[in-house]
Image (cartoon, rainbow, N blue to C red):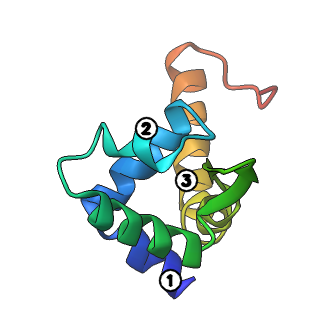
Amino acid sequence: MDKVFKALADPSRRHLLDLLHRENGQTLTALCEHMDMTRQAVTQHLQLLEDANLVAIVWQGREKLHYLNAVPLHEIYERWIEKFEHGRLGALRDLKNKLEGDDDDKT
């Protein structure tokens, strides 16, 4: 999980993940069009994302396609975010019910 956090720490790598989220299965050339850096720098960022298991590679003929792998992000969500979010959502639900005059626990 340390590799995932390290990979997410850089804004350029987060931008690459956003690009893949928007359109999965892009080539290096396509990704470079949206980055303000050299092809070699994009390649290094993609390698770190691949090492963190955030990007998967599929060869299609001679083209190397990059795909977002959201599993590590989901694992972070389950471990670090979901447990904190659950209480807040419950409190908002209770507040909504109280403000609407519906104190039943139907929801």
Q: Residues within 10 Å of mark 3 (few under 14, many from 20)?
A: few
Circle 3 residue: 85
Front position in the image: 61 or 10: 61
Q: Name the secondary structure under disc 1.
A: helix
In this rendering, is residue 51 above or below 37? Answer: below
Across and down, in percent, residue 59 comes to: 73, 54
Mark 1–mark 3 Cα distance, whole angstroms, equals: 24 Å
* Mark 2: amino acid: Ala
* Mark 1: amino acid: Lys
Which quadrant of the structure image shows residue 46?
bottom left
Circle 2 residue: 30
* Mark 3: amino acid: Glu
Which quadrant of the structure image shows residue 14?
bottom left
User: Which circle, 1 or 3, is nearer the viewer?
Assistant: 1
Across and down, in percent, residue 1 comes to: 57, 82
Across and down, in percent, residue 26 comes to: 55, 40
Q: Residues within 10 Å of mark 1 (few under 14, many from 20)?
A: some
Mark 1–mark 2 Cα distance, whole angstroms, equals: 25 Å
Q: Earlier in the sequence, mark 1 or mark 3?
A: 1
Q: Name the secondary structure under disc 2.
A: helix
Circle 1 residue: 3
Which quadrant of the structure image shows residue 52?
bottom right
